[in-house]
Image (cartoon, coloured by chain):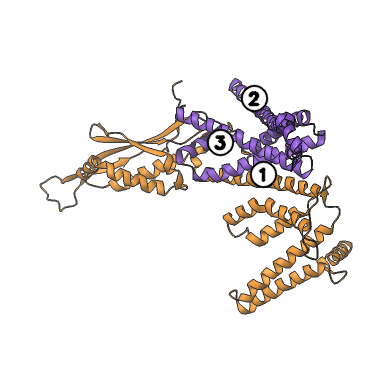
Amino acid sequence: MEDIIQDLQKQARSILVPTGYFTPQTLLLLSIFSLFIAAALEYTEGPEFAAIRVLTTMSWIFFTVAVWWALSQAKDLTIYGFKVYPWIVGIVLCCFLFRPWRSEDRLRWAVSTWPLISTGVMALPMFISWDLKLKQLKNKAKKMLITTTLVNLLLSSWIVFHFRVQDWVLSYPSLLVRGTSDSAFIYDFVVDREQPSQGVELLDRMTDEIASQLTGQPWYQAERWLYTRQPRLEAIYQDALNALESPDESLFWRLNVAEPRQVDEAYWLDLRADWAGPVARNGEFYLEKSCKIFPVNQPRAVARQDDEPQPMTQIAQVNCGEDSPTEQFVTPPV
Amino acid sequence: MPLRMIAFQVLFWMVAVAIEAGILRQRLRLGFQTSVQYAGVTNLAAIVCGWIAFLVIEPLMTLTIKTQIINYILFNRILMNGWTTQTGAILLAIALLAFFGTFFIKAKGIELFLRSDNAWKPVAKKPQKLLRDERYARARGAGVEVSQSNARFTDTMIQANAASFSAVLGLMVLRALIDGWNA
């Protein structure tokens, strides 16, 4: 146990204690020092103190340069003879520039520009020497630089493309009703991802709203509602769309409401949501949910005379069924 | 993750490089390593230009075209509302644009490489000032060599580009056939 602690101490000392004035360790210590002062200032002065920002920025700069310096001296950081330190420095620089933990957008920027920034880190010593003089590139180095830049541009575009696809899936989740196993571009790590579309939620929300608007209303009111249903349904539909988790995909939904069917005294209202967007394997699909709207008799709340029967009134009841709708696939005629 | 796309991209790139390097070596008499290098880098440049164009243009598209793009990328289908003349024309235009774009990039790229290696013959050979006799000689056809060499270069590039495009197209057709066979 003691050995391990001593070992750790030695390791820490070799990382932290500088062997001379101009070494990466000096910068690392400076970075830790400014971070420490910044923390102390935040403790005493509160987080709104301007010097704290300056100090943390300084700390980042010291840290980046220290890492850069230390790694560029390390000789064994190669993969097949290719130096990889610019990509590690690139990570540190991206963290410094974008602070990717703050938001999703910043993370995206950081990851997509990482290959490019790393190329810059790699290219910089080729153009500028230590005493800040411009260097002329040799022909061979130039070719190497061009190739590396192109490869890193390609990596960046792949990353951006990945995020683009991610965006599509996030804004239009109903795309994935039948998974993406047909794609020649995407490989989904989740095997057989077939998730229910948002149409389920859409119709459930609509029927809930219809039920809450009609239940308990006098029957003649409900009949009038059904008679002038178009604008009301449209409003309910829009509200339900906007309440979806990803309202962007409302572009792809079409609502179809047939004329209410009358069975005995009750009306059946059939709601049908058609998916007009793309989906795998030629599947067009729709979801359907029906609501039964029927009258019930209820005693009227008036004082009752002994000799008369209880006056009754008809109020509306709505029954949309407990089950959520499922996707019905239409195979287009061949 | 766009892993399949990456795999296909690397595969197509290697096929294109192999074919183009062979043609460059045969017709421009470049060394084996140089021709592979030139073909590799110029193809890479063409791919990167294509990507940048796609990534810039895609968000600017209308919803219908975007839908088609999503349909193709996620579900490997092009036809959503049936094949129309318009779809065909757009696809054809894109294909032609891609072909001539890559041709331009590759020709310019290899020209630049040859220049930086001081191996660019067609232009380097052109003399600045000509004596009277030489001018007559040129007019009589001795200077044909220069323009011929230039034409030969362009010819080679077109040929290499066409060969690699056909090969990649063949691979894609093959893949579609196997897909259709499995389904």
Give the residue pinned by disc 1.
A154
Colour for chain B in the figure? purple
Q: Mark 2: few, some, or many residues within 10 Å (few <14, many ≥20)?
A: few
Q: Is residue A199 left or right of residue A166?
A: left
**Where's residue B105, x and y in %?**
65, 39
Q: Viewed as shown, does residue A166 lie left or right of A283?
A: right
First in sequence: mark 2 vs mark 3:
3
**Quarter assignment of residue A85:** bottom right
Q: In the rendered image, which residue does mark 2 sit on?
A: B170
Q: Picture coordinates of residue A307 (x, y %)?
A: 10, 47
**Which amino acid is tagged 2?**
Gly
State the residue at coordinates (84%, 59%): A73
B159 versus A114 height, above or below: above
Marks 2 and 3: which is nearer the front?
2
Q: Residue furthest bottom?
A: A44
Specify whether residue B80 is in view. Answer: no
Indicate the colour of chain A.
orange
Residue under circle 3?
A: B74
- The three-letter amino acid code for the residue at tag 1 is Leu
Give the spatial CA distance, label 1 vs label 2: 24 Å
Q: Residues within 10 Å of mark 3 (few under 14, many from 20)?
A: many
On the same chain: label 3 and label 1? no
Chain for mark 1?
A
Depth check: give the residue in front, A305 or A32. A32
